[in-house]
Amino acid sequence: MSQENNQRSNKRMDHLIEKSMGVEVKRRSFLKTIFAAAAATVVPVKSVQAFSFEKFFQKHYKEMTEEQKKKVFARIKQETKEKFGIDVNVSDPAPIAGVKFAYCLNLSTCNGSRKCVTACAEENNIPPEIGSYIRVLEMPIGSMNPEKGSLFYKGESVPKDGKYYLPVQCNHCDNPPCTKVCPVEATWKEKDGIVVVDYDWCIGCRYCQAACPYEARHFNFQEPKVDVSKMNTQQSYLSNRIRPKGVMEKCTFCLQRSRNGQYPACLEACPTGARKFGNILDPESEVSQIFKSKRVFVLKEELNTMPQFFYYFD
Amino acid sequence: MKLITLLMILLITSSYAQESVEIEKRQMLLKNFPCMNCHANIKNSKANMPLSEPHQSTLFKHMDEITHCYSCHDEKDRNLLLLANGEKISFDESYRLCFQCHGEKKRDWELGIHGKQVGSWSGKKYKYVCTSCHEAHHPAFRLMEADPGPRHPRNEGENQEPSSAANSGARH
């Protein structure tokens, strides 16, 4: 009796499937496909899950202990290894006490050669979709209006007559509008003045991009395509590690270099020596000397963002 | 306690002592140095441009109406440079020659504001001299080729300015 019932229900099932799919389906083959599909969905999830589980319950970076940070660095290291097949060194140097960074740029000597742009991209593993954190504007002499500038100038021979060049990057404002709008506090200003993004905490809402008056924030619309052979393996959690898709990124004054006492990559690449970087609290540093002897200005001063990136002519 | 403070002071002073600037040495980078290898046998005191081999490519464009080779090069010992006061200096100190006239740049260079410095912002710095960026005989910067700029969203792959005016508003 029960067998008969079973058979009948099977037939009904087959009929329903045939009706909905428009194909004749054998029960056995149907079950096969179901199992295959289930296996296909379950198996890769399982292999990734061990990591994404850990990432999902990861704390906010500022609340992590040293132990937890070490675990996170190890996870990032392994993820990079799996994805790109390359061993990287992930760390995160802490802000140095008594140090506040500032940047000065001499617009009289900048010749628009975009060497800083390239150096920035190489140092920070920036995918070609984003290009670089530095954008050089070719400005007509006499104007300070960035809207008059051209970003896409051709560079066979620079500097051109009647033009000056205005490189723009993150101003690391003391009153940053970008960190205020973040709904999850994934971006903040560090003690040494560097505005950073926690890529694991960022939800990709792009509010900060809209809030930044300097267009210094960049969004990863796609999984970053980084040239593995040129990848910088000295990476830092808050700066140049490989970013996931759907997060913001920005200039960090190369904190993986600057917090270890080095100059940022853009400064070392500049062929004219227009870029100066240092500790604003040290009266002997280059930036302090510039404040004493040059007339510096900032971009969009009227917005009260208090940038820590200064320009001057001499 | 006193010992600790003493040690601390020692440590601090030593860390300050480390903070020094190394000035680039140019002499060993010169292509045809030492000059006297050839010039010991060549007695040519004429300063006619263009020069003969191997200096034929030297283009002299720096107050070229009032200065000539021996304003800066010592005529007798070609391994040395000549200051206006008659002092002879090596090529490693060539910046002193430039600073005879460029006092403002001297001040800024000594402060680390003018010119390129690499190394460490907190520690040892390596300072470039005038002639590592400016050609000695043509100090004005030459035109350079710039690296490629950002991709224009409408001219995919081409670093080109489109004809329309709205080109600065592209966000990345």
Image (cartoon, coloured by chain):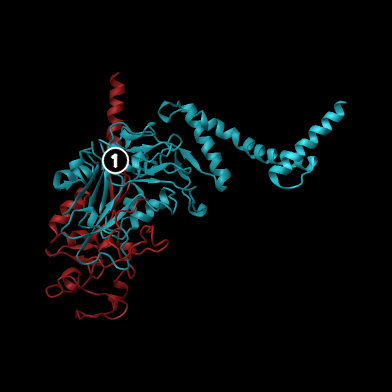
Chain colours: A cyan, B red
Asked whether residue B122 is in view, the answer is no
Amino acid carrying mark 1 in the image = His
Measured as percent of width and height from the top left, residue B68 is found at 16, 74
Residue occupying image coordinates x 77% and y 36%: A12
Name the one closer to the observer, A5 or B6.
A5
Indicate whether A200 appears above or below A128.
above
Residue occupying image coordinates x 46% and y 44%: A234
- In the picture, measured across the screen, residue A8 lies left or right of residue A104, that is right
Q: Quadrant of residue B28?
A: bottom left
Image quarter where the N terminus of chain A lies is top right
Indicate whether B60 appears above or below A39.
below
Image quarter where the C terminus of chain A lies is bottom left
In this rendering, the count of numbered labels is: 1
Residue occupying image coordinates x 28% and y 35%: A99
Measured as percent of width and height from the top left, residue B69 is found at 19, 73
- In the picture, measured across the screen, residue A79 lies left or right of residue B155, that is right
Measured as percent of width and height from the top left, residue A306 is found at 22, 39
Asked whether residue A20 is in view, the answer is yes
Measured as percent of width and height from the top left, residue A263 is found at 33, 46
Q: Quadrant of residue A159?
A: bottom left
Label 1 neighbour load within 10 Å: few <14, some 14-19, many 20+: many
Identify the residue position indicated by label 1 in the image: A172
- The chain under label 1 reads A
**The residue tagged with tag 1: helix, strand or loop?**
loop
Name the one closer to the observer, A50 or A91.
A50
Name the one closer to the observer, A110 or B96.
A110
Q: Residue placed farthest to the top in the image? A: B1
Indicate whether A187 appears above or below A129.
above
Q: Quadrant of residue A91?
A: top left
